[in-house]
Image (tube, rainbow, N blue to C red):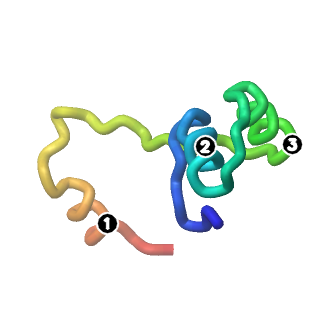
Amino acid sequence: MLSGFSIRSYGAIVTWLQQECGLTMQYETVRHFVRHKLQAKLKVPRPQSLKQPPGAIEQFKETSASH
């Protein structure tokens, strides 16, 4: 179904349900079901600094100790 797939908004879930499953559901119904019944949260990436030099993340991953 959605394994390995990241959805960033409840509106996207409403659209996906309509396109893939033929279900027409209200936004609030989807939000309540996801948050309270499934106890899930939307995955939103953390913001990145504009001052961050290019390649800083890759360099950090190469030099940091892996656990």
Mark 1 is surrounded, within 10 Å at the Cα level, by few (under 14), some (14 to 19) or many (20 or more) other residues, namely: few
- Please name the residue that numbered disc 3 is placed on: 37
Three-letter amino acid code at the position of disc 3: Lys
| Mark nearer the viewer, 1 or 2 | 2
- State the residue in front, 20 or 48: 20
Per the image, label 3 sits on a secondary structure element best described as helix
How many angstroms separate mark 1 from mark 2 (CA)?
A: 33 Å
| Mark nearer the viewer, 3 or 2 | 2
Point 67% across, 42% down: residue: 41
Residue 50: where, in percent of width, then height?
A: 19, 33
Point 57% across, 50% down: residue: 19
Three-letter amino acid code at the position of disc 2: Ile
| Mark nearer the viewer, 1 or 3 | 3
Three-letter amino acid code at the position of disc 1: Lys
Point 16% across, 34% down: residue: 51
Residue 31: where, in percent of width, then height?
A: 72, 32
Asked if marks 1 and 2 touch (Cβ < 8 Å), the reply is no
Residue 62 vertical position relative to residue 10 in the rendered view, above or below: below
Q: Is residue 52 left or right of residue 5?
A: left
- Please name the residue that numbered disc 2 is placed on: 13
Say which mark, if any, is on residue 61.
1
Per the image, label 1 sits on a secondary structure element best described as helix
Quadrant assignment for the N terminus: bottom right
- State the residue in front, 18 or 2: 18
Residue 8: where, in percent of width, then height?
A: 51, 41
Which of pointers 1 and 2 lies earlier in the amino acid sequence? 2
